[in-house]
Amino acid sequence: MIDGEDRTPLTRDFFDRPVLEVAPDLLGRILVRSTPDGPIEVRLTEVEAYAGEIDPGSHAFRGRTRRNGVMYGPPGHAYVYFTYGMWHCLNLVCGPEGMASGVLLRAGDIGTGADLARKRRFSARNDRELAKGPARLATALDIDRALDGTDAIAGPGAHLSVLHGTPPPRDQVRSGPRTGVGGDGAVHPWRFWIDGDPTVSPYRAHAPRRRST
């Protein structure tokens, strides 16, 4: 348990809002991952918004597929994808059903269950690095494609849940371009983070892949 935090679960209505409202409002919330070995809790410190078919940076930009179907709702469910043939990333679906928007959970501060996270993130040099980046966060929380579509509003005992936590003051929330997003999607300042938090991942601009010769 993360001491001093509001343990009230978030409701479906919290996620049933436009993605640009939900994303910064997720900062400071507590994501709880229930595992057979015990719970792991992470206070979210960095997120990114993805706005579906109007957003060139979104997996849903070109429409619905088998892979991205969960993004179309209902809100409050997990969208988990596999990237670079190595890593999983965790998103929370939001907005009206059918709009295909979601928030990528990029980083957080792990409290309860840090011992479990350390076993999965054995390369982390310290606890600040356990969930510093979306793939690290997913690894620390034992997230994979089996959790795609999981309802994070299902209540006690669910694989995933989100608690109220303690949102930061508004003047501590920063925004900027999304990490690694290129093309027309690069212009949107839809990455949000808590200023000065040591668990926030470093920003990296999109670097086009070079074709091998």
Image: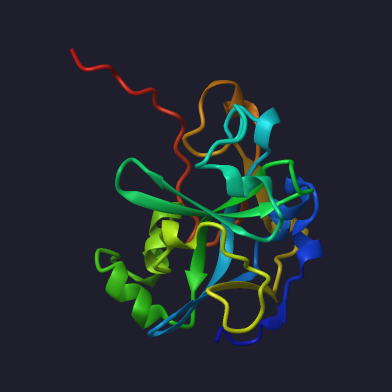
- Residue that lies at the very extreme toward the top in this rendered image: 213
Q: Is residue 185 above or below residue 89?
A: above
Identity of the residue drawn at 67% across and 31% down: 53
Q: Is residue 178 above or below residue 128?
A: above
Identity of the residue drawn at 35% across and 82% down: 115
Quarter occupied by residue 30? bottom right
Left or right for 11, reference 141: right
Q: Quadrant of the C terminus?
A: top left
Q: Residue 181's spot in the image, x, y percent?
A: 51, 32
Left or right for 159, reference 137: right
- Residue that lies at the very extreme toward the left in this rendered image: 213
Q: Is residue 154 above or below residue 22?
A: below
Q: Quadrant of the N terminus?
A: bottom right
Q: Is residue 125 above or below residue 74?
A: below
Quarter occupied by residue 117? bottom left
Q: Residue 169's spot in the image, x, y percent?
A: 75, 64
